[in-house]
Amino acid sequence: MDAEGVVCRKVRVIPEDGLHLRPLQLLVRKALTFSATITLTFDDRRADVKSAFDLMLLAAPTGAILCLETSGSDAVAAADAISELFETGFSISGSEIR
Amino acid sequence: MKVYTGIAVSPGVVSGPVLVLGSDNFRIPRKYVNRDAIDDELHRFHAAHEHVCRDIKSNEQLVSAQLGAQYGAIFSAHLQMAQDPRLIREVEALIREQTRSPEFAVSRVLRSYAEQLEKMGDRYLSERALDIFDLEKRLLRQLLGESREELRNLTEPVIVLAHDLTPSETATLDPKFVLGFATEVGGRTSHTAILAGALEIPAIVGLGRCLAGVSGGETVILDGDNGRVIIDPDSETVARVQDMQIRSEKIRTRLGLMEAFPAETEDGQRVTICGNIEFPEEVRQCIKRGADGVGLYRTEFLFLSGNREPSESDHYEAYCRVVEACGDLPVVIRTLDIGADKVPKLLESQFSKSQNPMLGLRSIRLSLLNTPMFKRQLRAILRASIHGNVRVMFPLISTLLEFRQAKMILMDVMEDLEDEGIPFQRNIPIGMMVEVPSAVILAEEFAREVDFFSIGTNDLIQYTLACDRSDPAVSNLYRSGDPSILRLIQMVLRAAEKHGKPVTVCGQMSSDPRFIPLLLGMGLRSLSATPQAIPRLKEVVRNLSISEAVRISQHASSLDLARDVEHYLQGELSRLCPDLVDTVGF
């Protein structure tokens, strides 16, 4: 964490289809549980992780390395939770309709 | 009388007066608002927005309760979009900074998202554009105080004909008044189509332009089994359909009771009856009707519905949904069986433009030429195999070499998975479709190498009698009752019995109750049919004894002509189950 309380991490898109609907839905759901500001940056495009539309339009393909930034009182917990989702590849349950 | 043809997505035949819903393009009355009224307009937007979110939530609860959580999830995704902070921020900004009307702002912002998504050329995301339009409609309807009242205040049963129905409109259709619906646009995998199937409302999508010629109130017959809409049918057609409906209604009620009973003959022989499915959602319909599993899971839809090749996880997710829903019941997954009749865009370049596509590069032949694509599918099948009782089946095998090659590739994939430490079912049963006469002739040789056979009668008839059933000039040759076909099936059954390998018959023949006594008499003990046919088939099995079936098959096998065979079987069926006969072959 730097002086302003901003946490920066790198995360990798593992799901084969890139950041698709299901990962995206999980991201938003998780992000909304934190008060921190959470953003992902890819290719100069920055997305608010609490916005499904932002994430869709980020169009991050498989293998892309994204820059995760969180700031706010629960910034560290938020960064942990979001990077965990990426690390586990949004573990597929296979029972949801896309 | 006018007939339109589309894609049948939910079966059933209904008739009634038509209710026409136009293309539903909301007219946005004004683009700008008065600067003094900005706060009021913002307030109006928020009120409408809140209302819409509440509506979506109640849709979600309703659908989850009635159809299950996985369908409700469609609406939790809608809710997430509706509550998106970016959407709200951008709409507010347009109203506040550019004095745009809330209607204009909502439409502008959402359409820009939809447009950008469509441009990405990505199947899933571009299909989501439809969900965005749904949200736009909801918000505009709220803001403009308009609604498709027509759909909510119905007092008499109607058939809905629309340019399009959104998933939310479909989910709230009242099956009491909406007998069926047909839309000009839409595809097989749209959420609207999936929901129609789950609600069991007969439905057809992708009719093409037809609304212009209909003003509403006309009598319409909607044939969800064959994807036909008949507007202003002549009296003869009406009478025929009504007659049939009354009878089939009675029978349906009785057959509904069949679901709980096993398919067992009078003398106690248990027969396995599985369902044929194409979409994961159809499993529900199989289980509901008491199927013994999924005997044929066609995987083509994964390839046909998009403009990119399905990934391993596309395959895996779809298979897992089916396998998990089936529990311990078997699921036979058939690898890609794309014929020249339904070439997906993404594989177009690989199909030879031959004069004789049915004899060309299709099905397993295509998979063997395109190993990376084939392996992706096999990996997903193997990975899914640990979640239940999975079997893999290769279509259109015509030589032993083909079967061995396909099996070899499967073994390669197993090795890869093992190296990567990914679990799978090592002794997954490996079978083949028997649908080419060469495979029947060599059935004994094949029986030594396969774990099971599944006879695909549709192609077998076509290849044996050398006739294209879609060509009206020769389609009279295409008959399940042809003595040559009976003989071929008998040959497969004998070869399999000799080597102790199970045989299933899938294809239209096994969905036709007339053929059940014949097939059982020949020694068949396993069928796979369209889910809707399962109760009928059970009824036949339960009214039959094996000795009777043997007698019927012996007599049928002695006849020379398809016509005589079918006529005889029809007679026997009407003796066994009199009221099933009239509903056959409509």
Image (spheres, coloured by chain):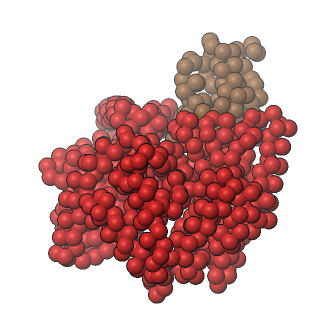
In the picture, the quarter occupied by the C terminus of chain B is: bottom left
Which chain did the image draw in red? Answer: B
Relative to B414, B184 lies left or right: left
Relative to B172, B416 lies left or right: right
**B544 or B393, which lies in front?**
B544
Residue at 70% over, 44% down: B428
Residue at 70% over, 59% down: B447
Which chain did the image draw in brown? Answer: A
Say whether residue B190 is visible. yes
Residue B356 position, x and y percent, is 64, 82
Say whether residue B159 is visible. no
In this view, B554 is above or below B117: below
Residue B494 position, x and y percent, is 62, 62
Residue at 37% over, 73% down: B568
Residue B444 position, x and y percent, is 71, 64
Please identify the residue farthest to the right as the structure is shown.
B419
Please identify the residue farthest to the bottom as the structure is shown.
B473
In this view, B322 is above or below B534: above
Relative to B152, A74 lies left or right: right
| Number of numbered labels in the structure image | 0
Residue B123 position, x and y percent, is 59, 53
In the picture, the quarter occupied by the N terminus of chain B is: bottom left
**B243 or B493, which lies in front?**
B493
Please identify the residue farthest to the left as the structure is shown.
B155
Q: Quadrant of residue A5?
A: top right
In this view, B251 is above or below B360: above
In this view, B166 is above or below B361: above
Residue at 64% over, 73% down: B437
**B199 or B488, which lies in front?**
B488
